């Protein structure tokens, strides 16, 4: 099985960008990051890492997010049920992938440190280890971005409510390969988070 798993050819990206950013008080997807919107930064990282297709799940502020994505090679999918939680967005993103996709990297729109090099490392680690899931790790935490082989898509589709892929990672245990991502600790949930990242990036 590991030999087969190492022959993945087509890696897609699913970018979850449907939330309302209630704790931040404004749409995190639209924060100005290096001259572009934060969601566009994540999408461009996926494109540079040769992920294809790139599916972006939108919900709250859908019109403005779509405007930020104008000109990018993305397939935007609207999630009318975005208020029900992140699982519904995962479902929309995974179901939008074509059958020929071998794996998908699930990304959040609020991790400004995501880079093409990190995403390439996830793919390389999968090919080197043959593991069905490759996740990032920082400060003892295992989380996104996460690469899932197609054989794990049903587990993502079985999630419900405001539950992300963490439960899938936990059930996999030692079956998850890890890529160190120290800056994964920086996500943007509150104004303080954004201020910390801006201060750090200017240091």
Image: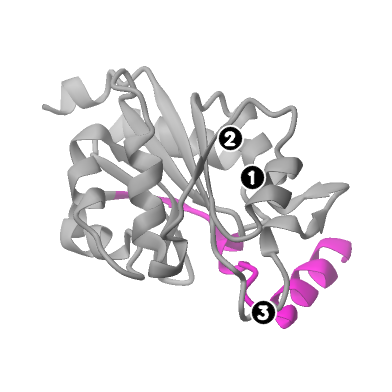
* Of residues 34 and 115, the one drawn nearer to the viewer in this rendering: 34
* Within-10-Å neighbours for mark 2: few <14, some 14–19, many 20+: many
* Within-10-Å neighbours for mark 1: few <14, some 14–19, many 20+: many
Task: Give how far apart the Cα atoms at labels 1 and 3 are.
Answer: 19 Å
Residue 188 pos. (x, y %): 65, 69
Left or right for 158, reference 107: left
The residue that disc 2 covers is 46
Secondary structure type for disc 1? helix
Residue 47 pos. (x, y %): 61, 29
Residue 32 pos. (x, y %): 83, 56
Task: Give how far apart the Cα atoms at labels 3 and 2 are.
Answer: 25 Å
Q: Residue at x 80, y 76 (%)?
A: 195
Mark positioned earlier in the residue sequence (1 or 3): 1
In this rendering, the answer to whether 109 lies above or below 95 is below
Left or right for 84, reference 119: left
**Would you say residue 5 sits in the magenta stretch?**
no
Q: Residue at x 73, y 82 (%)?
A: 192
Q: Residue at x 63, y 39 (%)?
A: 43
Left or right for 101, reference 66: left
Mark positioned earlier in the residue sequence (3 or 2): 2
Q: Quadrant of the N terminus?
A: top left
Secondary structure type for disc 2? helix
Label 1–label 2 contact, CB within 8 A: yes
The residue that disc 3 covers is 190
Residue 142 pos. (x, y %): 38, 63
Residue range in magenta is 177-203
Secondary structure type for disc 3? loop
Residue 128: image quadrant is: top left
Number of dots carrying numbers:
3
């Amino acid at each position: 099985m590991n030999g087969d798993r190492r022959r993945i050819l087509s890696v897609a990206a699913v970018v979850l960008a449907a939330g309302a950013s209630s704790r931040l008080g404004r749409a995190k997807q639209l924060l100005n990051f290096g001259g572009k919107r934060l969601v566009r930064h994540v999408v461009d990282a996926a494109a540079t890492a040769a992920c294809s297709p790139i599916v972006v799940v939108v919900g709250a502020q859908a019109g403005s997010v779509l405007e930020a994505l104008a000109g990018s090679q993305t397939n935007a999918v609207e999630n009318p049920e975005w208020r029900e939680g992140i699982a519904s967005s995962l479902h929309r993103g995974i179901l939008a992938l074509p059958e020929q996709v071998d794996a998908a990297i699930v990304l959040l729109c609020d991790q400004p440190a995501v880079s093409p090099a990190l995403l390439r490392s996830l793919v390389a680690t999968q090919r080197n280890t043959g593991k069905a899931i490759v996740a990032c790790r920082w400060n003892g935490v295992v989380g996104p971005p996460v690469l899932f082989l197609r054989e794990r898509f049903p587990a993502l589709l079985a999630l419900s409510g405001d539950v992300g892929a963490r439960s899938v990672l936990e059930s996999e245990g030692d079956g998850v390969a890890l890529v160190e991502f120290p800056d994964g600790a920086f996500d943007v949930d509150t104004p303080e988070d954004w201020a910390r990242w801006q201060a750090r990036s200017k240091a």
